Structure formats: structure tokens, C-alpha cells
Image (spheres, rainbow, N blue to C red):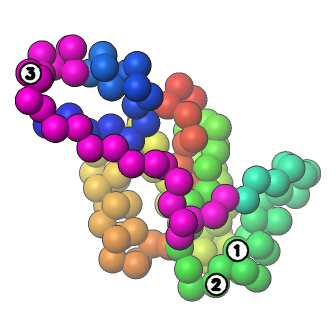
Amino acid sequence: MALTATADPRTAKDIVAQLHLKDDFVSLTSSFNRVNLFYIIRTKSKGFLEDIVIYIQNNFRGQCGIVYCLARKKCEEVAEFLRSKGLKADFYHAEADKAHKDTVMRDWQSGKLSIVVATVRVDS
């Protein structure tokens, strides 16, 4: 079984070749667009972290969401800042150890954690 959330058609073809899949394999795909999700992109101001806290508190109290950052270190800093403001937040990125990622996923799924701060790129 091969799973990916980001493979374009060229990459998917390469995965099939690399795994030596036969002609009878099943490939399931769907659009990344989800009607229950929406995206907000804002210009980064000098006090952007405070702006994020105020925005979450005013518009999404009691709801869950993901804050994306361009760098792993920034994920950790933003999550720490959000926690310092009383929000239930933690970071999730490729360099985090497995135990941390498992805890974040478990806490997110159980509702103990409402904000995940993650990288938007894998090369950050």
C-alpha cells in the first residue's frame, strides 16, 4: 500500500514504478479541496502573533484549526506563544520526535488540543 496526500500525476506515476506495482493495482484519488475547510491568508504585521491570538479568540473560540508556518523553529515558537496566551496549541513538523507527534495527534483527535502549528513546506 502506498499513501500520499500531495503527489501530482507525475509523482504518482513514479511511485507506481518505484514500487513495481502491477497493472491490477487500485488507485484512489480525490481533490484536496474540502468544503468544510476554509483558508485565511493575511499579511504579516509587526504584531502578527497577537493578531492571531485575537483573531482566534474572537472568531474560533472552542473550535479547532491549523496555523501554518514556513519553518520548523517558527512552528515551535508560535505554538509556545499561543500556549502562553491560554490557547491549547502544540507544534507538528518533520523534525519532531515520534513520541511528540503521536501525542499531538492523540490530543488533537481527542479534543484536548485545539490548535496545531505546522509547517507548510517539507524543506523548512
Q: Are marks 1 and 2 in contact (CB under 8 Å)?
A: yes
Q: Which numbered circle lies on residue 22? A: 3
Tell me: residue 8, above or below residue 84: above
How far, Cα to Cα, is label 1 from label 3? Answer: 48 Å
First-in-chain label (1 vs 3): 3
- Judging by the rendered image, the residue that carries numbered circle 1 is 56
Judge whether residue 80 can be spotted in this image.
no
Please, is residue 108 above or below residue 9 in the view?
below
Is 38 situated above or below 113? above
C-alpha distance separating marks 1 and 2: 6 Å
Residue type at the position of mark 2: Arg
The one of 97 and 94 positioned closer to us in this rendering: 94
> Taking the image as drawn, is residue 16 in sight?
yes
Furthest toward the right, the residue is 46
Mark drawn on residue 79:
none
Classified by dominant secondary structure, the portion drawn in magenta counts as loop
Provide residue 54's location: percent of width, then percent of height.
79, 74
| Amino acid, disc 1 | Ile
Earlier-in-chain disc, 3 versus 2: 3
**Which residue is under mark 2?**
61
Q: For the magenta stretch, what is the residue range?
A: 16-39
Q: Which of 14/27 is in front?
A: 27
Q: Earlier in the sequence, mark 1 or mark 2?
A: 1
Asked if the residue under mark 3 is in contact with the one under mark 1, i.e. CB atoms within 8 Å, the reply is: no
Quadrant containing the N terminus in the rendered view: top left
Q: Residues within 10 Å of mark 3 (few under 14, many from 20)?
A: few
Q: Quadrant of residue 26?
A: top left
Tell me where residue 10 appears, x and y as whole percent: 40, 19
| Placement of 52 over or under 62, stated as above or below | above
Q: Secondary structure at mark 3?
A: loop
Image position of 30 (left or right of 114): left
